[in-house]
Image (cartoon, rainbow, N blue to C red):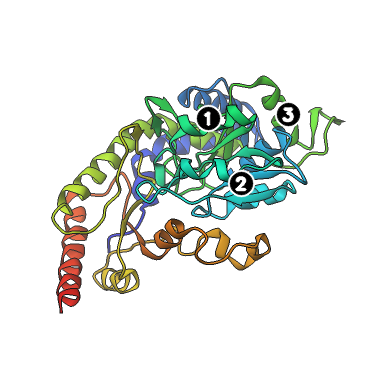
Protein backbone atom coordinates (compact mmCIF):
# COMPACT_ATOMS: atom_id res chain seq x y z
CA UNK A 1 0.00 0.00 0.00
CA UNK A 2 1.25 3.48 -0.89
CA UNK A 3 -0.59 5.81 1.51
CA UNK A 4 -1.83 9.25 0.55
CA UNK A 5 0.01 10.64 3.58
CA UNK A 6 2.14 8.85 6.18
CA UNK A 7 2.22 10.66 9.52
CA UNK A 8 3.72 7.64 11.25
CA UNK A 9 6.80 7.75 9.01
CA UNK A 10 7.24 11.42 9.89
CA UNK A 11 6.89 10.70 13.62
CA UNK A 12 9.51 7.94 13.54
CA UNK A 13 12.06 10.42 12.21
CA UNK A 14 11.51 12.96 15.00
CA UNK A 15 10.27 10.68 17.78
CA UNK A 16 12.89 11.49 20.39
CA UNK A 17 12.57 15.27 19.89
CA UNK A 18 8.77 15.17 20.04
CA UNK A 19 8.63 12.93 23.10
CA UNK A 20 11.04 15.20 24.97
CA UNK A 21 9.02 18.29 24.03
CA UNK A 22 5.76 16.74 25.22
CA UNK A 23 7.42 15.58 28.44
CA UNK A 24 8.55 19.16 29.04
CA UNK A 25 4.96 20.40 28.87
CA UNK A 26 3.78 17.64 31.18
CA UNK A 27 6.39 18.67 33.72
CA UNK A 28 5.66 22.40 33.41
CA UNK A 29 1.87 21.86 33.46
CA UNK A 30 1.45 24.81 31.05
CA UNK A 31 -1.28 23.07 29.10
CA UNK A 32 -3.11 26.09 27.64
CA UNK A 33 -1.07 28.81 25.95
CA UNK A 34 2.09 29.11 28.10
CA UNK A 35 5.77 29.42 27.26
CA UNK A 36 5.86 26.83 24.47
CA UNK A 37 3.01 28.53 22.61
CA UNK A 38 4.61 31.95 23.10
CA UNK A 39 7.93 30.67 21.75
CA UNK A 40 6.23 29.05 18.78
CA UNK A 41 4.38 32.28 18.01
CA UNK A 42 7.71 34.11 17.82
CA UNK A 43 9.41 31.43 15.78
CA UNK A 44 6.64 30.84 13.27
CA UNK A 45 5.90 34.54 12.71
CA UNK A 46 9.63 35.07 12.06
CA UNK A 47 9.56 32.12 9.65
CA UNK A 48 6.70 33.85 7.82
CA UNK A 49 8.64 37.15 7.79
CA UNK A 50 5.93 38.76 9.92
CA UNK A 51 6.31 40.69 13.17
CA UNK A 52 3.56 39.06 15.24
CA UNK A 53 1.96 35.63 15.60
CA UNK A 54 -1.16 34.70 17.57
CA UNK A 55 -1.71 30.99 18.17
CA UNK A 56 -5.29 29.72 18.17
CA UNK A 57 -7.05 26.37 18.29
CA UNK A 58 -7.72 25.89 14.53
CA UNK A 59 -7.09 27.46 11.16
CA UNK A 60 -10.81 28.20 10.96
CA UNK A 61 -10.57 30.22 14.17
CA UNK A 62 -7.57 32.06 12.73
CA UNK A 63 -9.66 33.17 9.76
CA UNK A 64 -12.66 33.99 11.95
CA UNK A 65 -10.69 36.15 14.39
CA UNK A 66 -8.71 37.88 11.63
CA UNK A 67 -11.97 38.93 10.00
CA UNK A 68 -13.37 40.15 13.31
CA UNK A 69 -10.19 42.09 14.10
CA UNK A 70 -10.54 43.79 10.71
CA UNK A 71 -14.01 44.96 11.72
CA UNK A 72 -15.93 42.62 9.40
CA UNK A 73 -19.51 42.02 10.45
CA UNK A 74 -23.18 41.90 9.45
CA UNK A 75 -23.98 43.79 6.25
CA UNK A 76 -20.41 43.51 4.92
CA UNK A 77 -19.25 41.50 1.93
CA UNK A 78 -16.02 39.53 1.63
CA UNK A 79 -14.67 38.35 -1.72
CA UNK A 80 -13.16 34.87 -1.93
CA UNK A 81 -13.19 31.77 -4.14
CA UNK A 82 -15.60 28.81 -4.21
CA UNK A 83 -12.85 26.24 -4.88
CA UNK A 84 -11.47 25.88 -1.37
CA UNK A 85 -12.12 23.93 1.80
CA UNK A 86 -15.43 25.03 3.30
CA UNK A 87 -13.73 26.62 6.34
CA UNK A 88 -12.72 29.66 4.27
CA UNK A 89 -16.35 30.48 3.65
CA UNK A 90 -17.59 29.35 7.05
CA UNK A 91 -15.30 31.84 8.78
CA UNK A 92 -16.83 34.68 6.76
CA UNK A 93 -20.31 33.42 7.62
CA UNK A 94 -19.46 33.33 11.35
CA UNK A 95 -18.92 37.10 11.36
CA UNK A 96 -22.35 37.73 9.86
CA UNK A 97 -20.81 38.97 6.60
CA UNK A 98 -21.73 37.66 3.15
CA UNK A 99 -19.23 35.62 1.12
CA UNK A 100 -19.01 36.81 -2.49
CA UNK A 101 -17.30 34.45 -4.92
CA UNK A 102 -15.06 34.97 -7.93
CA UNK A 103 -13.77 32.19 -10.16
CA UNK A 104 -10.29 30.67 -10.08
CA UNK A 105 -7.40 30.70 -12.51
CA UNK A 106 -7.47 27.13 -13.89
CA UNK A 107 -3.66 26.95 -14.02
CA UNK A 108 -3.07 27.64 -10.32
CA UNK A 109 -6.49 26.97 -8.73
CA UNK A 110 -6.15 30.36 -6.99
CA UNK A 111 -8.19 33.55 -7.30
CA UNK A 112 -8.66 34.95 -10.82
CA UNK A 113 -7.44 38.49 -10.25
CA UNK A 114 -9.25 39.71 -13.39
CA UNK A 115 -12.60 38.83 -11.81
CA UNK A 116 -12.21 40.83 -8.60
CA UNK A 117 -13.16 44.36 -9.71
CA UNK A 118 -16.59 43.35 -11.00
CA UNK A 119 -17.41 41.66 -7.66
CA UNK A 120 -16.75 44.79 -5.57
CA UNK A 121 -19.75 46.72 -4.25
CA UNK A 122 -20.25 49.48 -1.71
CA UNK A 123 -20.55 46.74 0.94
CA UNK A 124 -17.25 45.00 0.13
CA UNK A 125 -14.82 45.23 3.06
CA UNK A 126 -12.23 42.52 2.48
CA UNK A 127 -10.65 40.06 0.06
CA UNK A 128 -9.62 36.55 1.18
CA UNK A 129 -7.33 34.97 -1.43
CA UNK A 130 -6.60 31.27 -0.85
CA UNK A 131 -3.10 29.91 -1.45
CA UNK A 132 -4.58 26.59 -2.47
CA UNK A 133 -2.57 23.35 -2.46
CA UNK A 134 0.56 25.33 -1.47
CA UNK A 135 0.63 27.62 -4.52
CA UNK A 136 0.41 31.36 -3.73
CA UNK A 137 -2.32 33.49 -5.22
CA UNK A 138 -1.13 36.31 -7.49
CA UNK A 139 -0.86 38.83 -4.67
CA UNK A 140 0.40 42.05 -6.32
CA UNK A 141 -2.77 42.65 -8.37
CA UNK A 142 -4.92 41.67 -5.38
CA UNK A 143 -3.12 44.13 -3.12
CA UNK A 144 -3.30 46.88 -5.77
CA UNK A 145 -7.06 46.45 -6.09
CA UNK A 146 -7.45 46.38 -2.31
CA UNK A 147 -5.53 49.64 -1.92
CA UNK A 148 -7.57 51.33 -4.64
CA UNK A 149 -10.82 50.41 -2.90
CA UNK A 150 -9.74 50.61 0.75
CA UNK A 151 -10.16 46.87 1.38
CA UNK A 152 -8.51 44.56 3.90
CA UNK A 153 -6.60 41.54 2.53
CA UNK A 154 -6.58 38.42 4.70
CA UNK A 155 -4.56 35.54 3.26
CA UNK A 156 -5.89 32.03 3.70
CA UNK A 157 -2.50 30.34 3.90
CA UNK A 158 -3.80 27.24 5.68
CA UNK A 159 -2.24 24.99 3.00
CA UNK A 160 0.83 27.10 2.25
CA UNK A 161 3.38 27.00 5.09
CA UNK A 162 6.62 28.29 3.59
CA UNK A 163 5.16 29.10 0.18
CA UNK A 164 6.62 32.24 -1.38
CA UNK A 165 5.40 34.95 -3.72
CA UNK A 166 8.22 36.76 -5.52
CA UNK A 167 10.62 35.75 -2.77
CA UNK A 168 8.36 36.72 0.16
CA UNK A 169 6.67 34.22 2.44
CA UNK A 170 2.91 34.05 2.22
CA UNK A 171 1.04 35.26 5.27
CA UNK A 172 3.14 38.41 5.45
CA UNK A 173 1.88 39.91 2.18
CA UNK A 174 -1.60 41.08 3.15
CA UNK A 175 -2.91 42.70 6.32
CA UNK A 176 -3.07 39.31 8.03
CA UNK A 177 -2.27 35.71 7.14
CA UNK A 178 -4.01 32.64 8.55
CA UNK A 179 -2.54 29.16 8.95
CA UNK A 180 -3.86 25.76 9.97
CA UNK A 181 -1.79 23.15 11.79
CA UNK A 182 -4.20 20.28 11.21
CA UNK A 183 -2.14 17.06 11.42
CA UNK A 184 -1.98 16.43 7.68
CA UNK A 185 -0.68 19.91 6.81
CA UNK A 186 2.94 20.52 5.79
CA UNK A 187 3.41 21.77 9.36
CA UNK A 188 0.92 19.79 11.39
CA UNK A 189 0.17 19.52 15.09
CA UNK A 190 -0.72 16.34 16.96
CA UNK A 191 -4.28 17.57 17.15
CA UNK A 192 -5.70 20.93 16.07
CA UNK A 193 -4.03 24.31 15.86
CA UNK A 194 -3.88 27.57 13.92
CA UNK A 195 -2.21 30.97 13.82
CA UNK A 196 -2.68 34.51 12.56
CA UNK A 197 0.47 36.36 11.52
CA UNK A 198 0.56 40.11 10.92
CA UNK A 199 2.68 43.24 11.11
CA UNK A 200 -0.16 45.20 12.72
CA UNK A 201 0.11 45.64 16.50
CA UNK A 202 -3.56 46.60 16.94
CA UNK A 203 -4.82 43.53 15.09
CA UNK A 204 -2.50 41.46 17.26
CA UNK A 205 -3.88 42.96 20.47
CA UNK A 206 -7.47 42.40 19.35
CA UNK A 207 -6.95 38.78 18.29
CA UNK A 208 -5.08 37.96 21.49
CA UNK A 209 -8.10 39.16 23.43
CA UNK A 210 -10.68 37.50 21.18
CA UNK A 211 -9.00 34.06 21.45
CA UNK A 212 -9.12 34.22 25.28
CA UNK A 213 -12.66 35.32 26.16
CA UNK A 214 -11.99 38.93 25.14
CA UNK A 215 -9.74 39.48 28.16
CA UNK A 216 -6.62 41.63 28.10
CA UNK A 217 -5.88 40.52 31.65
CA UNK A 218 -7.50 37.73 33.61
CA UNK A 219 -11.13 38.60 34.34
CA UNK A 220 -10.74 41.95 32.55
CA UNK A 221 -13.04 41.25 29.58
CA UNK A 222 -12.68 44.09 27.10
CA UNK A 223 -14.43 42.34 24.20
CA UNK A 224 -17.01 39.58 23.75
CA UNK A 225 -14.54 36.83 22.99
CA UNK A 226 -14.11 33.10 22.45
CA UNK A 227 -12.26 30.12 23.86
CA UNK A 228 -9.89 29.66 20.90
CA UNK A 229 -6.60 29.15 22.75
CA UNK A 230 -3.76 26.97 21.42
CA UNK A 231 -2.73 24.13 23.74
CA UNK A 232 0.75 23.96 25.23
CA UNK A 233 1.48 20.45 23.92
CA UNK A 234 0.62 21.54 20.37
CA UNK A 235 2.92 24.53 20.68
CA UNK A 236 5.76 22.28 21.84
CA UNK A 237 5.21 19.74 19.04
CA UNK A 238 5.00 22.47 16.42
CA UNK A 239 8.26 24.03 17.62
CA UNK A 240 10.01 20.70 17.03
CA UNK A 241 8.42 20.23 13.62
CA UNK A 242 9.15 23.79 12.51
CA UNK A 243 12.87 22.99 12.75
CA UNK A 244 12.35 20.32 10.08
CA UNK A 245 9.93 22.21 7.84
CA UNK A 246 12.48 23.50 5.34
CA UNK A 247 13.88 20.01 4.76
CA UNK A 248 10.41 18.52 4.44
CA UNK A 249 9.41 21.26 2.00
CA UNK A 250 12.40 20.65 -0.21
CA UNK A 251 11.61 16.93 -0.18
CA UNK A 252 8.05 17.68 -1.30
CA UNK A 253 9.32 19.92 -4.07
CA UNK A 254 11.73 17.21 -5.24
CA UNK A 255 8.92 14.65 -5.24
CA UNK A 256 6.71 17.02 -7.25
CA UNK A 257 9.54 17.56 -9.74
CA UNK A 258 10.00 13.81 -10.07
CA UNK A 259 6.25 13.31 -10.58
CA UNK A 260 6.36 15.99 -13.29
CA UNK A 261 9.28 14.25 -15.00
CA UNK A 262 7.67 10.82 -14.90
CA UNK A 263 4.30 12.09 -16.17
CA UNK A 264 5.73 14.48 -18.76
CA UNK A 265 4.89 12.28 -21.75
CA UNK A 266 1.61 10.90 -20.47
CA UNK A 267 -0.68 13.72 -21.52
CA UNK A 268 -1.95 14.01 -17.94
CA UNK A 269 -2.23 17.64 -16.75
CA UNK A 270 0.08 18.16 -13.77
CA UNK A 271 0.40 21.13 -11.36
CA UNK A 272 1.81 24.29 -12.89
CA UNK A 273 3.90 26.65 -10.76
CA UNK A 274 3.87 30.27 -11.91
CA UNK A 275 7.10 32.26 -12.34
CA UNK A 276 6.40 34.17 -9.12
CA UNK A 277 5.72 31.11 -6.99
CA UNK A 278 7.57 28.82 -4.64
CA UNK A 279 5.04 25.99 -4.55
CA UNK A 280 5.20 23.85 -1.40
CA UNK A 281 2.90 21.07 -2.66
CA UNK A 282 0.61 20.47 0.26
CA UNK A 283 -1.40 18.76 -2.47
CA UNK A 284 -0.12 17.42 -5.80
CA UNK A 285 -3.25 17.27 -7.95
CA UNK A 286 -3.43 15.98 -11.48
CA UNK A 287 -6.53 16.40 -13.64
CA UNK A 288 -8.57 13.75 -15.43
CA UNK A 289 -12.08 13.50 -16.85
CA UNK A 290 -12.14 9.88 -15.68
CA UNK A 291 -11.42 10.59 -12.03
CA UNK A 292 -13.73 8.06 -10.43
CA UNK A 293 -12.47 5.24 -12.64
CA UNK A 294 -8.83 6.22 -12.10
CA UNK A 295 -9.23 6.50 -8.35
CA UNK A 296 -10.80 3.06 -8.15
CA UNK A 297 -8.11 1.55 -10.39
CA UNK A 298 -5.31 3.10 -8.33
CA UNK A 299 -6.89 1.90 -5.09
CA UNK A 300 -7.04 -1.62 -6.54
CA UNK A 301 -3.26 -1.37 -7.10
CA UNK A 302 -2.73 -0.29 -3.48
CA UNK A 303 -2.29 3.42 -4.24
CA UNK A 304 -4.29 5.81 -2.10
CA UNK A 305 -5.46 9.13 -3.55
CA UNK A 306 -7.64 12.03 -2.44
CA UNK A 307 -10.01 14.60 -3.93
CA UNK A 308 -9.55 18.24 -2.91
CA UNK A 309 -12.36 19.25 -3.42
CA UNK A 310 -15.25 17.40 -5.13
CA UNK A 311 -17.92 20.11 -4.75
CA UNK A 312 -17.20 23.86 -4.97
CA UNK A 313 -18.64 25.74 -2.01
CA UNK A 314 -21.25 27.64 -4.05
CA UNK A 315 -22.89 24.30 -4.92
CA UNK A 316 -22.91 22.87 -1.40
CA UNK A 317 -26.41 22.60 0.12
CA UNK A 318 -25.24 24.48 3.23
CA UNK A 319 -24.54 27.60 1.13
CA UNK A 320 -27.47 27.43 -1.27
CA UNK A 321 -28.85 30.56 0.41
CA UNK A 322 -26.09 32.61 -1.24
CA UNK A 323 -28.05 32.28 -4.48
CA UNK A 324 -25.40 30.86 -6.79
CA UNK A 325 -26.09 28.16 -9.37
CA UNK A 326 -24.22 25.61 -11.45
CA UNK A 327 -22.40 27.37 -14.26
CA UNK A 328 -21.63 30.55 -12.30
CA UNK A 329 -17.94 29.66 -11.81
CA UNK A 330 -17.00 27.27 -14.63
CA UNK A 331 -13.28 26.96 -13.83
CA UNK A 332 -13.97 26.10 -10.18
CA UNK A 333 -16.66 23.63 -11.21
CA UNK A 334 -14.46 21.91 -13.79
CA UNK A 335 -11.58 21.65 -11.32
CA UNK A 336 -13.91 20.12 -8.74
CA UNK A 337 -14.89 17.45 -11.28
CA UNK A 338 -11.34 16.65 -12.43
CA UNK A 339 -8.72 17.03 -9.67
CA UNK A 340 -7.16 13.90 -8.22
CA UNK A 341 -4.58 14.25 -5.45
CA UNK A 342 -1.63 11.85 -5.55
CA UNK A 343 0.38 10.60 -2.55
CA UNK A 344 2.54 13.44 -1.22
CA UNK A 345 4.68 13.42 1.90
CA UNK A 346 8.35 14.04 2.51
CA UNK A 347 9.18 10.38 3.14
CA UNK A 348 7.72 9.16 -0.17
CA UNK A 349 10.40 7.16 -2.02
CA UNK A 350 11.36 7.46 -5.68
CA UNK A 351 10.35 3.83 -6.18
CA UNK A 352 6.88 4.65 -4.83
CA UNK A 353 6.66 7.68 -7.13
CA UNK A 354 7.59 5.45 -10.07
CA UNK A 355 4.90 2.94 -9.12
CA UNK A 356 2.27 5.69 -8.91
CA UNK A 357 3.25 7.24 -12.23
CA UNK A 358 3.47 3.92 -14.07
CA UNK A 359 -0.09 3.18 -13.00
CA UNK A 360 -1.32 6.63 -14.08
CA UNK A 361 0.48 6.45 -17.41
CA UNK A 362 -1.18 3.10 -18.11
CA UNK A 363 -4.58 4.58 -17.29
CA UNK A 364 -3.88 7.55 -19.56
CA UNK A 365 -2.92 5.24 -22.41
CA UNK A 366 -6.13 3.25 -21.95
CA UNK A 367 -8.15 6.47 -21.95
CA UNK A 368 -6.45 7.66 -25.14
CA UNK A 369 -7.38 4.40 -26.88
CA UNK A 370 -10.99 4.77 -25.73
CA UNK A 371 -11.21 8.37 -26.94
CA UNK A 372 -9.71 7.40 -30.28
CA UNK A 373 -12.24 4.63 -30.70
Q: Earlier in the sequence, mark 3 or mark 2?
A: 2
Q: Residue at x 44, y 36 (%)?
A: 161
Decide: is 267 above or below 349.
below
Indicate the quadrant where residue 331 lies.
Answer: bottom left
Are the residues at dot 3 and dot 1 in contact (C-beta closer than 8 Å)? Answer: no
Q: Earlier in the sequence, mark 2 or mark 1?
A: 2
The Cα atoms of the two marked residues, 2 and 1, are separated by 23 Å
Residue 222 visible from this viewpoint: yes
Q: Who is closer to the viewer here, 161 or 264?
A: 264
Are the residues at dot 3 and dot 2 in contact (C-beta closer than 8 Å)? Answer: no
Residue on which disc 1 sits: 143
Residue on which disc 3 sits: 206
- Classed neighbour count for the residue bearing mark 2: other residues with Cα under 10 Å, few (<14), some (14–19), many (≥20): many
Left/right of residue 129 with respect to residue 262 in the rendered view: right
Looking at the picture, how far across and down is residue 35, in whole percent? 61, 26
Indicate the quadrant where residue 298 lies.
Answer: bottom left
The Cα atoms of the two marked residues, 3 and 2, are separated by 17 Å
Q: Residue at x 16, y 48 (%)?
A: 261
> Extreme bottom residue here?
373
Q: Who is closer to the viewer here, 337 or 185?
A: 337
Q: Earlier in the sequence, mark 3 or mark 1?
A: 1
Task: Give the secondary structure at mark 3.
Answer: helix
- Classed neighbour count for the residue bearing mark 1: other residues with Cα under 10 Å, few (<14), some (14–19), many (≥20): some
Q: Residue at x 53, y 49 (%)?
A: 102
Are the residues at dot 2 and dot 1 in contact (C-beta closer than 8 Å)? Answer: no
Residue on which disc 2 sits: 60
Q: Quadrant of the C terminus?
A: bottom left
Task: Give the secondary structure at mark 1.
Answer: helix
Amino acid sequence: MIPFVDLKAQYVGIKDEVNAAIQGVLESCQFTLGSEVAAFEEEFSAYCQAQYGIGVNTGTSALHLALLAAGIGPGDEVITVPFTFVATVAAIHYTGAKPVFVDIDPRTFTMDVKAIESAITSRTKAIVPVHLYGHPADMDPILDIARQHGLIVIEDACQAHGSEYKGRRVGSLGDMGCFSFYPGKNLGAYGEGGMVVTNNAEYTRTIRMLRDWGAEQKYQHVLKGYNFRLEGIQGAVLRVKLRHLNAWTEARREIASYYNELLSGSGVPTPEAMYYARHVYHIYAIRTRKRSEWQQALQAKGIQTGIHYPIPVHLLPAYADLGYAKGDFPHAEQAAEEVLSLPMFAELSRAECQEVCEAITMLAEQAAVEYAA
